[in-house]
Amino acid sequence: MKNNLPTEAGQSNSGQRQPPNTGHIDAINQVFALFQLNYHNQYFKAFSNDKDLNYIKRLWLDSLSRFEPEVLLKASRSVIENSEFLPTLKRMIQACEEAAQPDLPDAHQAFIEACQAPSPKAGFTWSHPIVYHAGKASDWFFLQNNPEHIAFPVFKANFNKLCERLLKGEELPAPQVKALPAETTTPLNKQENQVRLKQLRDTLKI
């Protein structure tokens, strides 16, 4: 088909990205095929001729080749399920970033978990450390003493910031329960023992 990209990968326009491979090219073609089926009128209005369509595909291929092909397909399905409008490249990048973190709960699920977690928070078994850190950054007291329409936007902002840090390769440590300080006692000397014994005798009147 004319609308399909060639199956041989060319060089990326950005020297900082790896050249896309055949898997990326196949994934981009599948993504646009899904968009054509689900956004039929919008699709043909946006891509009125083969020349424009191939140019857009190459642009998307260059920008999205940092993601694995399966991430591209997962992101495209997420976009289709959650939006009535044909996505921009920026929205697709966001969807790919979200799809690249399959073990993360969504922001609202994380918010509910953070609000319901018992104390001590560090001792709770979290679905992911990001939930604990987002709750801590939002302030536990604030989360538990404000309605959702006030607390959730604050939590979501902190959650998204932590997601960005994870995408950049940072690791969030698991919460650590602070150990109780070991009890230390200094033995009393002979004189102190005598004073303590006298006090005890005076108290007991013996």
Image (spheres, rainbow, N blue to C red):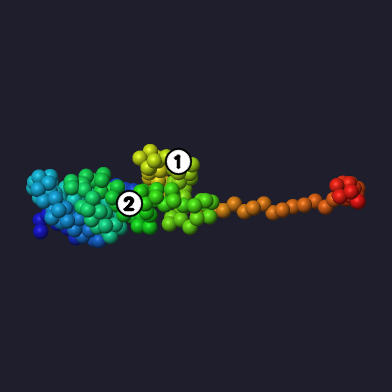
Q: Which mark is residue 1?
A: none
- Residue 50 x, y percent position in the rendering: 10, 50
Q: Nearer the viewer, mark 1 or mark 2?
A: 1
The residue beneath circle 2 is 98
Task: Name the one closer to the observer, 81 or 45.
Answer: 81
- Horizontal side of 137 relative to 95 (left or right) equals right
Residue kind at label 2, given as amino acid type: Glu
- Residue 36 x, y percent position in the rendering: 13, 53
- Furthest toward the front, the residue is 205
Residue displayed at 24% across by 57% down: 73
Residue displayed at 48% across by 57% down: 125
Residue kind at label 1, given as amino acid type: Asn
Q: Is residue 116 above or below residue 149?
A: below
Q: Under tag 1, what secondary structure?
A: loop
Viewer can see residue 11: no
The residue beneath circle 1 is 145
Residue displayed at 45% across by 46% down: 135
**What is the C-alpha distance between the residues marked 1 and 2?**
30 Å
Q: Quadrant of the N terminus?
A: bottom left
